[in-house]
Image (cartoon, rainbow, N blue to C red):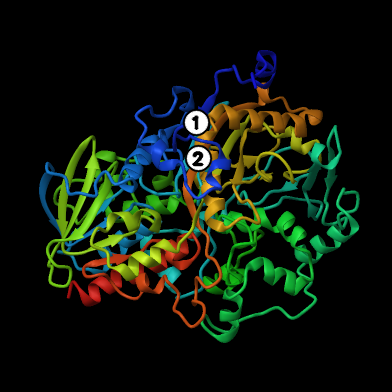
Amino acid sequence: MTACPYSDKLLGLTEPISRRDFLDGVLIASAGAVAGAVCPFPLVAQSAAGPVPEWSGYTGEGDYKDSAGNTEAVLRDAHAVRDGKFDRAPAKIIETGELFDCVVVGGGMAGLSAGLFFHQQAGEKRTCLILDNAKIFGGVAKRNEFLVDGHRLYAPQASVHFQPPYPNSFLETVYESMGLDWEAFKSYQKWQGPSPEFWLPRSPYGVGKLNGKDALGFYFGAKYGHKPGLWITDPWGKNLEGTPFSDATRKEMLALMKDKPVVSPLVYDYPGDPISRELDGMTLEDYFIRTFDVSRDTVRLFMTSECASGFGLGPDVLSGFLQYEWSKTIPTVDDSMESGIQMFPGGNSGMARLMVKTMIPAAIDGARSMEGVWKSPLNFGALDQPGQRVRLRLESTAFRVEHVGQQGKSELVSISYTKGGELYQVKAKTAVMAGGGWITKHLVRDLDESRRTSYETFNYSPYMTANVAVRNWRFLYKLGISSAAWFEGFSRSINVRRSATFGVDTDVVGPDLPTVLTFFVDFAKPGLPARVQGQMGRAEILSTPFSGYERQIREQMNEMFGPSGFDAKRDIAGIVLNRFGHAFINPPPGFFFGLNGKPAPREALRGGPFGRIAFSHCDLAGAMDHRNAFIESHRAISQLLDSVLT
């Protein structure tokens, strides 16, 4: 279909704008082709054509410019590894001559925390190198920056917020070791705007309040027979009255929302007990049906995006054990939006910066203060200097990790990587694989059959975060809401949030000031096998150019908010797309404790190191969360220090 030039002009598609397209692939076959047995990615990945020029665009400001989501370079190098380019050891490679006590492959939260633990526990004479494939460390814990009408705005690329830990807990010691100062989170932006005042959450997952009620609106458009669309404000407070859902669906949605089970919930005492294994033996969808007596259709309508925001896909393919992932598996003192949840202005990139500052003090000028580490620019030249106990080497994609000689007798590990078009090799006494199972299974060349088989059981799904900077949010205020949700079109919700004052340039917030609206986009396709859902999702994000998503965002926002004064051409100041091809692991039944008397496949990877190589990526825990990253990395480093580097 040819786009209408007049429509493009009205939407602002022809205007100069802060734009970013994620280059995670090239135009490929339609998603429908992926539902078959053969995935088209290998053919596309080997294409010499590369992405079309119009895919690229604005990438934000500051340290994270040119590093929104998985970039073209990251994709190209990773797919070369996957597609066998380095299956044979290259004849020509530059030996760096370096020998480290530990090389960590991956610079996300798992990799950085592994480096931090090694730095703190291994002794002053031990050295560590962290290799990361991106232009800046952090993995999904990166941020986007915008300059809008004189204000610098921040938004998370993926990893968003955190919660206060229990006193004297492992998590508390990790936060303390990186220099996280809780006092800094006692001051958030205050209201500066008209009356009535909105209470705003600290996270894009929160919902605002107005006069003690949810400042939330549900929007229903053409899919539900409403054109123009219909807004229902405070829908939960009204028990969904006025919504186009059937009476039965409303009743079931309310039962799920208000947590009103009809049979006793299954609550385990400790992981591995009979009840936890029962939960792990069913899907989360079946658990909801059993516990709340709701239909499968209602579960998929209401719970898919909710589950996908934490686990990538919907409850139809996820283990029922995940019901308690946040409350029991990795508990914290206070998980409430009102008093517990805390957030750096641009998400958990703040933690990543603190860890790097702790390991490499010269990485960021000045003292290790919250404001200084957040606002001061990164000194990239200080990251990889000879003589440092910890070095961080960016834009370095590992392609071979293997023991030197026979695995059981080897004293060294060889790590080969590509950087700037050249091939390099470094050696280490130990290695930590912290970059995710989807790539680790290709990197460790001498991996034993048991561990390799375990990796083959893991499924991953993509995710996208679209950060849209707007010059004001009066269009929401006029509707009496600061949070919006919908059941059709692009994404499913947005929320206005307030920021911790140490990280922003104004201590006030209101509808007349610019803000960033964060759209989270999952690619769940309930009813299909998990692996197929992941493949189809990746096909979609690889084959959709930036202009396609930009048009969806602009048209949808004009449709929903135009009647209350929004104009996409006038009010959108910047768009950044962050696409991640393997954002989440999707744990099926049996992932945590195994099925039919067989152990869970992941235990082959967590039970101990493979020779001199340990595995720390957080997907081994079953949920992509910074707390799990810390737990898995601490385990991996402890295994190496206890049994290898003795």
In depth, the one of 89 and 298 nearer the eye is: 89
Q: Are marks 1 and 2 in contact (CB under 8 Å)?
A: yes
Q: Tell me: residue 200, above or below residue 100.
A: above
Residue drawn at x 44%, y 36% is 25
- Tag 2 or tag 1, which sits nearer the N-term? 1
Name the residue beneath numbered marker 1: 20
In depth, the one of 477 and 8 nearer the eye is: 8
Is label 1 in a helix, a strand or a loop? strand
Name the residue beneath numbered marker 2: 578
Left/right placement of residue 135 relative to residue 413 reads right
Amino acid marked by disc 1 = Arg
Residue drawn at x 46%, y 64% is 627
Q: Quadrant of the C terminus?
A: bottom left
Q: Which residue lies furthest to the left in this view?
A: 97
Tell me residue 314's x, y (percent). 63, 58
Tell me residue 3's x, y (percent). 65, 19
Q: Quadrant of the N terminus?
A: top right
Amino acid marked by disc 2 = Asn
